[in-house]
Image (tube, helix red, strand yellow):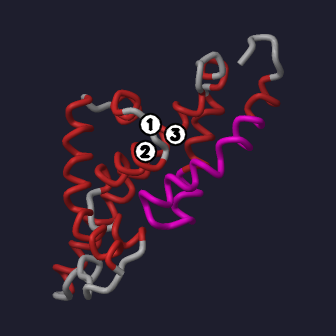
Amino acid sequence: MRDDSDPVADMAALYRQTWPRLIGVLVSIGGSRADAEEVAQDAYVKLLARWDAIRRFDDPETWVRAVAVRTMISRVRRRQVATRALARLTGRPDTARGTDGAALDVAAALARITPEQRAIAVLHDVLELPIEQIAVDLQLAPGAVKSRLARARRALAPVSAVTENA
């Protein structure tokens, strides 16, 4: 973005251009459109507070996506911990884990892997981001991104086989 351009117009243009794609990524990671919209909104609020510096970046979308994805991973992780704790307290099994062997949809398949693996798989296989970019976005070593992507693909392989044969 140019230094002499209108910051409000630039921010509005970035928002319009990136919102739908960011929501899609966050829904894929978190499973809930409401959560995705809330997390994205928070990321854009943080972007607004830092816009004078971030507008000079080559790709401000990368910054807002990284903030939103890290926030969504934390939210999903906290929800999983709370669900397991509630299941232990009530004596009810965690029903979010089981499948009946029927063909699964994408959200159900992604729910089978950790939030970190889910984020990496979506960023790499859906957005087609390179390993190095994902490592920077998620503040991980490239080797950690590669190993988590490999684990995610191994975990999803049985699901892929079911849907391919259906």
Residue sitting at x 32%, y 59%: 78
Residue 104: within the magenta?
no
Between 142 and 79, the residue placed more toward the observer is 142
Q: Horizontally, is 23 left or right of 153 in the view?
A: right
Residue 101, position in %: x, y? 25, 85
CA neighbours of label 1 inside 10 A, class few (<14), some (14 to 19), many (20+): some
Q: Which callout, 2 or 3, points at the residue further toward the start of the chain?
A: 3
The stretch in magenta equals 12-39
Q: Could you say which disc has been placed on residue 17 in the image?
A: none
- The amino acid marked with disc number 2 is Leu
Residue placed under numbered mark 3 in the picture: 65
Q: Which callout, 3 or 1, points at the residue further toward the start of the chain?
A: 3
Residue placed under numbered mark 1 in the picture: 129
CA neighbours of label 3 inside 10 A, class few (<14), some (14 to 19), many (20+): many
Tag in front: 2 or 3: 2
Residue 130, position in %: x, y? 39, 33
Residue placed under numbered mark 2 in the picture: 123
Tag in front: 3 or 1: 1
Q: Please tell me in which quadrant of the rendered image residue 87 appears.
A: bottom left
- The amino acid marked with disc number 1 is Leu
Q: Are marks 1 and 2 in contact (CB under 8 Å)?
A: yes
Residue sitting at x 45%, y 66%: 31
Residue sitting at x 42%, y 68%: 106
Vertical arrangement, residue 20 with respect to residue 82, above or below: above
Residue sitting at x 41%, y 51%: 122
Residue 37: within the magenta?
yes
